[in-house]
Amino acid sequence: MGVMMPKPKRESANEIVLARTDWEALREAVEEADDVAAVMAARAEDAAWAAALPDRRATIFPHEVISAELDGTHPLRAWRNYRGLTQRSLAERAGVMRDLIAQVETGKRQGSVETLSRLAAALGVPMDALVAP
């Protein structure tokens, strides 16, 4: 842990008395060690999760996309906005009609597998990232 142990002010069989500054430093060191252990455990969990994915690839979901989806925005619109695209420019990139994108984003249509696949490729995300819950 790399912490110098403080010298007790007084010691008996049942208790040890430390200066307050020594006690606070010791508590801070223990808290720091707990934080480091938590980060290491989270990284190990992330690595195990990523290793279990096909082709060891993971999609990173930006905060802006997650926040928009939590606020009720359709995933297609969230990703389109995150990429800075208009419905028209996404339609051109994906080779689909702009009206179809609008209908999917408003929930009037779900979009076929082929359409979602084209949109996902144009946005650079896996197709399942565009499916509304």
Image (tube, rainbow, N blue to C red):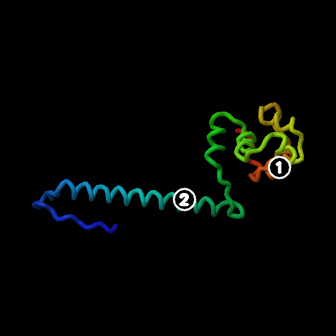
Label of residue 65 in the image: none
What residue is shown at x 32% (from left), y 68% (from top)? 2
Of labels 2 and 1, earlier in sequence is 2
Label 1: how many Cα within 10 Å (few below 14, some 14–19, many 20+):
some
Label of residue 45 in the image: 2
Camera-side residue of 55 and 31: 31
Amino acid under disc 2:
Glu
What x and y, as percent, mark residue 35?
A: 41, 56
Spatial distance from mark 2 to mark 1, Cα to Cα? 30 Å
Camera-side residue of 21 and 13: 21
Write down the quadrant of residue 4 in the picture: bottom left
What residue is shown at x 89% (from left), y 47% (from top)? 95
What x and y, as percent, mark residue 36?
A: 42, 60
Query: Closer to us: mark 2 or mark 1?
Result: 1
- Horizontally, is 106 left or right of 114 in the view? left
Q: Which residue is labeled 1 in the image?
A: 117
